[in-house]
Image (cartoon, grey):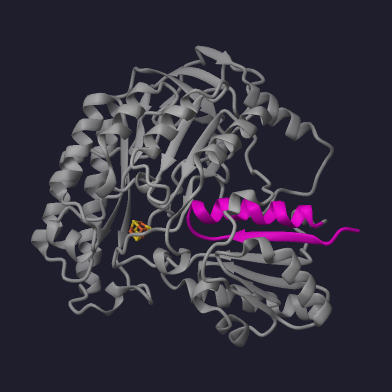
Amino acid sequence: MARTYEVRTYGCQMNVHDSERLTGLLEDAGYAAAPAGEQADVVVFNTCAVRENADNKLYGNLSHLAPVKAANPGMQIAVGGCLAQKDRSTITQKAPYVDVVFGTHNIGSLPVLLERARVQEEAQVEILESLDVFPSTLPTKRESAYAAWVSISVGCNNTCTFCIVPALRGKEKDRRPGDVLAEVRALVAEGVTEVTLLGQNVNAYGVEFGDRQAFSKLLRACGEIEGLERVRFTSPHPAEFTDDVIEAMAETPTVMPSLHMPLQSGSDRMLKAMRRSYRSSKYLGIIERVRAAMPDAAITTDIIVGFPGETEEDFLETLRVVRESRFSSAFTFQYSKRPGTPAATLDEQVPPDVVKDRYGRLVALVNEIAEEENKRIVGRTLELMVSEGEGRKDAATLRLSGRAPDNRLVHFNPEGADGVRPGDMVTVQVTYGAPHHLVADGPVLAVRRTRSGDAWERRNAAPATPAGVGLGMPSIGVPAPLPDAPACR
Ligand code: SF4
């Protein structure tokens, strides 16, 4: 009997994609996914250091597993990801029953470390300071048959003062365009029709090999790949956003009209304190040019309120930029100290009740604008890619869900779409707009069966396999922005 595994993932899209690699590696090494409801022989925590109290939560979760492990002596626990990179051997000191600790630069070592820990009956801690091999060369078990993440770079050369990423993921490493395109082509050959290009700062792509227009060229090259219908990317950085990217987006029909561009603050004073090297006028200028080139583009963002030293005037600047930008949604965060970041030691931390009040006002404005923008779409006809597991209430409402070209989530009445599968395309008319989704309650106007739907069907017709990997998120592999997990923090 193969030993079984479970991977628990926390944090951003980078971690979600890393977990696809961890599961691929484990299956390559002969492990099998643990059946739903059964205790796995190996539990892997792929951790995040960005979320507040991430360490307390990790140690809480580990302590729940301690008695399970005591009752199952062959069981192993591994901890990887950003918190492992940060805390290193502290983890095995605080939780001595942990067998393996591995960092963000050596996920490929997991099977070997598990085996070594088993044979030597001793915890293995391996943290590399920098990346030797780009992780995309590792085996990967994709969670979705129709949409896939493709890494173009890892790490970040910026030094935003609230962000732990540069310390834990290191300097930016770019993957060669030929390797990226070869992976995209291989995915398309397997039935994938949507890819999301992934990097902490996609606009800096090419810095390592000296081509400032490398990202726009990559978008155009993706547009040439036959069978690829939708190309997305995350996250761009306003400081390095250049017009050639806007042109490539507008002129490449398969690059979708959506843009997730972190604002973080509308106050120039706060942007300076955050060490974000653009100002609000530059940000708004990019939005204006994107809208001029793609009038229907949906623009989303990340915003932090209550950064140290933020005054009411600074906050009003953020509200102003939000009003002018008309985001279709925004991930909003109350600033909280992240140990290890420069901002954590700044004086003038904003009192929690002030942060809470500003946060409430920001969310109200964001939702008001998002609802107005969504209501403007009522009556329009959209082609959706049918998605899996994205409509929490679909079972109760008898609807299915899909993503519009601009990545808006649409819940639709499946009448007229018998046998439609995730990855297929349906055409619907929008009947209702809410702040966070659209509804199409008329019958489906057209169905287009796709290679992705075929791939989904093949995967689901395969002999019963153990339950999918427990990544702890409902929308794994579906490259929509995750509700609490921006890529760039
Ligand atoms: S917030 Fe984004 S751009 Fe800034 S340092 Fe972190 S990963 Fe880099």
- Number of numbered discs on residues: 0
Residue at the farthest right position: 1
Q: Is residue 16 magenta?
A: yes
In-front residue for pair 123/332: 123
What residue sits 58% from the left and 81% below the top? 91
Q: Nearer the viewer, residue 175 or 50?
A: 175
Residue 36 image offset from top left, x and y in percent: 75, 54
Left or right: residue 291 versus residue 30 is left
Q: Residue reaching furthest top?
A: 445
Residue 395 shows in this picture? no
Residue furthest to the left: 313
Q: Residue at x 44, y 54 (%)?
A: 485
Which quarter of the image is occupied by the N terminus?
Answer: bottom right
Q: Residue at x 69, y 24 (%)?
A: 454
**Residue 364, position as x, y percentages in the image:** 24, 49
**Residue 363 in sight from this viewpoint:** yes
Report the magenta residues as a range.
Answer: 1-29
Q: Residue furthest front?
A: 210
- Give the side of residue 456 with respect to residue 415, left or right: right
The question of residue 437 being in magenta is answered with no
Which quadrant does the C terminus fall into? bottom left
Q: Quadrant of residue 225?
A: top right
Judge left or right: residue 336 versus residue 346.
right
Task: Dividing the image into four quarters, tell me where ligand 1 lies.
Answer: bottom left
Q: Position of residue 301 (x, y in %)?
A: 31, 46
Name which quarter of the figure residue 351 lies in. Answer: bottom left
Could you say which is closer to the camera, residue 247 or residue 416? 247
Q: Position of residue 275 (x, y in %)?
A: 23, 63
